[in-house]
Amino acid sequence: MFTGIIEGLGKVKRLTMKGADAVLEIESNVDLTDVSIGDSISVNGACLTVTAKNKQDFQADVSAETISRTTLKYLHTGNKVNLEKSLRVGGFVGGHFVLGHVDATGRILSQTQKSGSLILAVEMNDNLSRYIVEKGSVAIDGVSLTVNKLEKNRFYVNIIPHTSANTTLVMKKEGDWVNIETDILGKYVEALLKTPRGIDKDILEQYGFLNK
């Protein structure tokens, strides 16, 4: 689990395809001292397992599922990526709970400068729109952001100067693809509503949401 607060940037050394899977090697400016083999690191919002490391570099396997759902397949040597180590128990949650399980990719439609901030419009699959709400949270390339505005198949987020200076979002161009992970809360609510009983008046009363 992650928080969407990027700890540093990495530079891709190489992405080696192995059939439908891949091996990703990254040079990191994040301190890897407390990272062990088997630990998780978020790379552009995708949770990957560290399979090898030294002081500055690490290696991770990328499954066919991750390749199919994320922008990692487009990475080339020298590309910069957002990095975040997994959340430790008792750690500070400055963004929101991010699982590193990318839902889909979206496309940047526009970039608008407003005062010191950058407003991004991101086009998404219609199926994702039900999980995104205005003033709710969304992760773009692993960065925790607040949804400013929501339209049918697009949403808008505000990139403050600090985020621009410390993530790859400012490097994106119109037409570029990004990884999107919606807030997990909406998915669980939807799943619960699909259960045979679902949420009814009795359930709400049972857990104290309604007075009997």
Image: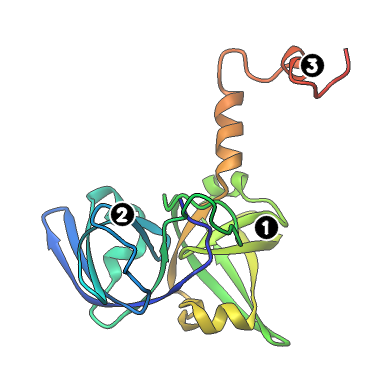
Spot occupied by residue 114 in the image (x, y as percentages of width and height): 71, 84
Tell me which amino acid carries mark 2. Answer: Asp
Spot occupied by residue 128 in the image (x, y as percentages of width and height): 54, 48
Q: Residue drawn at (46%, 53%), measured in percent from left and top?
A: 88
Tell me which amino acid carries mark 1. Answer: Glu
Q: Secondary structure at mark 1?
A: loop
Q: Secondary structure at mark 2?
A: loop
- Furthest residue in direction left, as rendered: 19
* Other residues around mark 3 within 10 Å, as few (<14) / some (14–19) / many (≥20): few
Choose the circle earlier in sequence order: 1 or 3.
1
Tell me which amino acid carries mark 3. Answer: Glu
Choose the circle earlier in sequence order: 3 or 2.
2
Q: Residue drawn at (31%, 64%), measured in percent from left and top?
A: 72
Q: Which residue is mark 2?
A: 39
**Nearer to me, 181 or 125:** 181
- What mark, if any, has residue 205 been given in the picture? 3
Instruction: State if disc 2 and disc 3 touch (CB < 8 Å).
Output: no
* Other residues around mark 1 within 10 Å, as few (<14) / some (14–19) / many (≥20): few
Choose the circle earlier in sequence order: 2 or 1.
2
Q: Residue drawn at (68%, 58%), measured in percent from left and top?
A: 150
Q: Which residue is mark 1?
A: 151
Q: Is residue 199 left or right of residue 102?
A: right
